[in-house]
Amino acid sequence: MSQAAVSSPSPAAVKDEFSPFQAMADRFEAAADHLKLDAGVRDVLRTPDRELTVAIPIYMDDGKLRVFTGYRVQHNFLRGPCKGGIRFAPDVNLDEVRALAAWMTWKCSIVGIPFGGGKGGVICDPKALSQGELERITRRYTASIMDILGPDRDVPAPDVGTGEQTMAWIMDTYSMHVRRTSTAVVTGKPLNLGGSKGRREATGRGLMFAMREALRTMKDMPAQARIAVQGAGNVGGIGALLLHREGHKIVALSDERGAIHDPSGLDMPAVMAWLDEQGRLPKEKRKFLDSYPAEHLVPKEKLLEIDCDVLAPCAVENQITSKNVDRVKARLIVEGANGPTTAVADEVLDKRGIVVVPDILSNAGGVTVSYFEWVQDRMGYFWTEEVVNARLEQTMVSAFAEVHGTAKKHGVSLRKAAYILALDRVATVYRMRGVFS
Amino acid sequence: MKDYSDGASIDEARPTGPALAEESPFRSMMSLFDEAAAQLGVDPAIYAILRKPDREITVSVPVQLADRSWTTFNGYRVQHNQGLGPFMGPLRLAEKLELDEVRALAGWMTWKCAVVNVPFGGSAGGIQLDPKAHNRRILERVVRRYTANILDVIGPDRDILTPDAGTDAEMMAWVMDTVSSHQRYTENAVVTGKPVAMGGSSLGQEAVALGLETILRLALERYRVPVAGTSVIVQGAGVVGGTLVRLLHAAGLRVIGLSDSRTAVFSEKGLDVPALLEWRRLHRHLEGAQGAFELLTPAELLKRPCDVLVPCAVANAIDSKNARGVRARLILEGAHGPISAKADRTLHDKGIVIVPDILANAGGVMADYFEWVQNRQGLAWQPDVLKKRLARFMTEAWHEVLEVEQRQRVRLRMAAHMLAVQRVAKADQVRGIYA
């Protein structure tokens, strides 16, 4: 490996390292270069098809009128209706929404589900709003973007600050406007309102499948891998539990406060049961892994550097960076979070021969089961959890095989291969459909 | 006139709803659900909203009769609650049809779908006319004009119509054709109970009996009664009762009694079910059948001792007058409301377990749901797939009702009603009040 690349990165790289969107843009360009896409097509794929900004006036509980701002960006319709989350957060901005919409286009393309990418958001602080205010915001926002929404147009899903309840309000508002029941207009709904079984575990389960497939392609990996997982929520926690069930050893697990480490393997069912219990306590009494009764408590920052075969960063972006990449000991990294590895760190990992399964492939289990929810809603018939899980497995296994095949064929990393595959699929559809005018 | 081969005739079509008090049909239908809501502690304000029908439409249906004179019939469609999905419910033709009765049927459908987890709300409709007093051509005009008048509120994602008393598969085809002609595309998912050739269910009306069989097996398992040799008496030998005895006989149960509207046959050792059904197929009645059995009146049959009694014929077959004489361990309600409220109490006091109609005979509503799914998919499921899925849904519903029964410590009937109210209330709550 090249120490120099780490200790003295180029000034440009330092400036942009912590912008995941810049990272995605760079990866897009690299894949486009590789595919030799001409400037016109490149421009089409880069530019969102449609961006909508709406004013959302609502009466607050104190009787005062306040206007919120909401966005919906539809990046690309080429492969099907747009699909992507709606986030409620104070720092929502159009640039971010735009980038996340594009991200969804590539993600859907990689796992081969018939959607384009979309994303939306409302600038607000859900923690400072009452249920009634949130409901009014959601309903007015839905009504304002009605014209571009629909099961065949654009299908939102939950994201930061939104959840099942928000999706139920969207479904209800949309259904009342179109004068019929339309469950397929959003995914991530409650189970009794057209939701899918297995959705909560979908991303963690998808991660498990991606890791299993990656391990199969690597020589000298033990049958029982030692895995460190950063994040103990729906992705990391559930992923770790499923990997434990697959017979692997979870040697470390962390959450936002602390990390636990046991080289002989954690008792995952016990850890998850403890976390579930703590999660049900009132906010001020909630406990995190830093108070877990374990033999080996470690600072959470150390998790990434623990001695293990596989590392799964499943928390937030920018975790493996130029600052700590040298100390990563894993030989395989499977990204559960969005953008946990910076582009600079990526290069170093590549040089060190560490395999990285990229986020847009390994955490696509969530959007895949969202797709299943949409399919089930359209036919009005709901699969058993076993069927959902089996189809998720099928999707993840074949997506991994395709990305892996592309990587071998072009002699590039899995990440670059994933982008090449995603772009190529969208560009091919673009050429076939032609330019409508 | 009716040359379609697979549909139900008017005689065979069975009403979808429970027995209703003539004075106040809606209130009488709702009484048990009101009790269930109170026991569940559903917020009275929320319950008041979900109790009231969402929408009621009355239409005038003008038609020219055979003698070229004009007359108008009253048509209704009541949509009770769409919390769980599009409305679905029967279309009934009856001379003395009143709005409040339609309202009661609509509410009943909401709860019925909710118990078995079928994603529909409840509705009902009908036309106030005597179907026997008019020829098919007039009936066709009536049904088509009625359909056109309610076109704005029906559709596969809005409201789905099913056959009921006075309507049949061919009439469902008229509704489908009228809707499709207006829409300018084939819209077969707007009605169920259609002829198979137009996307109807290949199970036909056997679905109710299949559902009963599944529930009976589960009930026997729960109350630790072995299947083989268990004695069963079935009241009703038509499409529900007849199919059920055929299935039970094949499964090794001992069918000891069977009746139709005139005759009952009984044999402690077990009846020769295939021979009796063949006789009935040829002669339309059990009357006159020969064999090693006792001949009884249908009323006497209900008093014979048995493990399981399945009333599949009429409402209030067991009432305060004969309830004391019933000597079964388990009663499975195949018909709608075969046990009157007073009789229900008497039987319970005698320690007889009753599996309520809303759960036991839900095979029909399930088949309607499956038909709708198949129409939306544009794919007809194989009969064995249909049967398997029907059994799965019935089994899940059974276990869910049992869960409520154990948690709330109530009878199966109340547990089923509570499960229904709970589901609809939850859906209304997460959807919120649209404004």
Image (tube, coloured by chain):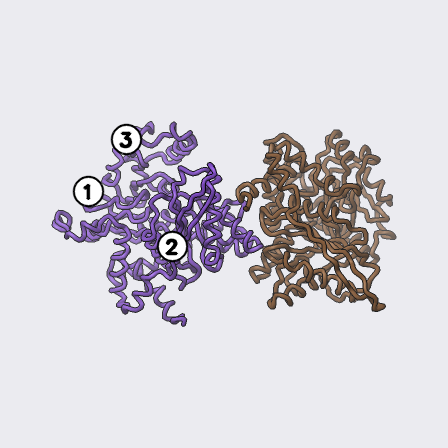
Chain colours: A purple, B brown
Marks 2 and 3, how far apart in space?
35 Å
Q: Is residue A45 left or right of residue B96?
A: left
First in residue order: circle 1 vs circle 3: 3
Q: Earlier in the sequence, mark 2 or mark 3?
A: 3
Q: Nearer the viewer, mark 2 or mark 3?
A: 3
Task: For marks 1 and 2, give the CA distance.
Answer: 30 Å
Up the image or down, B177 lies above or below B84; here it is below
Residue A316, percent from left and from top: 31, 43
Q: Which residue is mark 3?
A: A297
The residue at which mark 2 appears reads as: A397
Amino acid beneath label 3: Leu
Could you tell me the amino acid type at mark 1?
Arg
Residue at left offset 85%, top offset 68%? B67
- Quadrant hosting residue B141: bottom right
Secondary structure of residue under mark 3: strand
> Does B28 appear above or below A170?
above
The residue wearing badge 1 is A327
Q: Amino acid at mark 2?
A: Val
Q: Is residue B376 above or below residue A17?
A: below
Q: Dot 2: few (<14), some (14–19), or many (≥20) neighbours within 10 Å?
A: some
